[in-house]
Image (cartoon, rainbow, N blue to C red):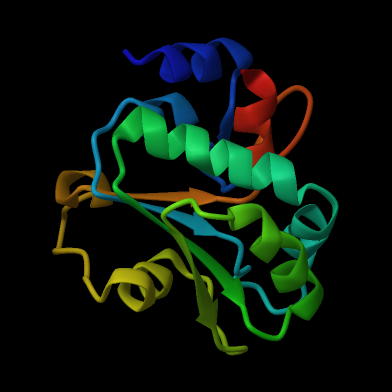
């Protein structure tokens, strides 16, 4: 288990979806692409935008930590183009990192993992496979810990 995976397991960082997928499992994978999902699928939810506006440095730092732990050679950061304040907040923190901003339209299910991965790397997941099997890691901006949400929780745990 990578050092980051051990820390995330200790801090109980899990996905914010219904399954509560343990983030330490993702941090222990070896992938080619790390994709950050800041493009909320649900049309009336705006938590990711607020997190990106208020914690951009922590989110990008968490993404860099995940990229390093998983040996990802490229990062893709998905967000809806209409969320100008989030784009303006996140953009400067990417700097010279090998992270590309991926802009999604304002339609449902824009932000859905399948749609985001296909848009970011033009690769569709094979039936009954996991993205990790295909060397792709998708991490939502909002995850849960005892202290804070998101990729920023990964940064804060370290």
The image quarter in which residue 79 lies: bottom right
Instruction: Please report the residue visible at 27 percent of the width from the left and 32 percent of the height from the top.
Output: 29
The image quarter in which residue 125 lies: bottom left
What is the total number of numbered labels drawn onto the structure image? Answer: 0
**Which x, y percent locates residue 96?**
51, 54
Closer to us: 52 or 73: 73
Relative to 127, 58 lies left or right: right
Instruction: Please report the residue visible at 65 percent of the width from the left and 20 percent of the height from the top.
Output: 157
Instruction: Please report the residue visible at 59 percent of the width from the left and 55 percent of the height from the top.
Output: 94
**Which x, y percent locates residue 77?**
51, 62
The answer to whether residue 106 is above or below residue 63 is below
The answer to whether residue 114 is above or below residue 60 is below
Relative to 125, 150 lies left or right: right
Residue 150 visible: no
Closer to us: 4 or 132: 4
**Which x, y percent locates residue 121?**
29, 70
Residue 48 visible: yes
The image quarter in which residue 116 lies: bottom left
The answer to whether residue 128 is above or below residue 71 is below
Q: Quadrant of the N terminus?
A: top left
Instruction: Please report the residue visible at 78 percent of the width from the left and 53 percent of the height from the top.
Output: 51
Q: Quadrant of the C terminus?
A: top right
Closer to us: 37 or 75: 75
């Amino acid at each position: 288990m990578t050092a980051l995976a051990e820390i995330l397991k200790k801090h109980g960082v899990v996905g914010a979806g219904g399954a509560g997928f343990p983030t330490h499992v993702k941090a222990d994978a070896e992938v080619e692409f790390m994709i950050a999902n800041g493009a909320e699928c649900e049309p009336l939810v705006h938590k990711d935008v607020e997190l990106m506006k208020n914690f951009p440095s922590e989110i990008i730092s968490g993404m860099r930590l995940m990229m390093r732990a998983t040996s990802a050679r490229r990062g893709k950061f998905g967000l809806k183009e209409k969320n100008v304040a989030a784009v303006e907040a996140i953009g400067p923190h990417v700097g010279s990192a090998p992270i590309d901003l991926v802009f999604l339209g304002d339609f449902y299910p824009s932000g859905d993992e399948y749609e985001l991965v296909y848009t970011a790397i033009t690769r569709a997941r094979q039936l009954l496979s996991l993205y990790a099997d295909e060397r792709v890691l998708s991490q939502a901006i909002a995850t849960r810990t005892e202290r804070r949400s998101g990729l920023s929780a990964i940064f804060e745990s370290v």
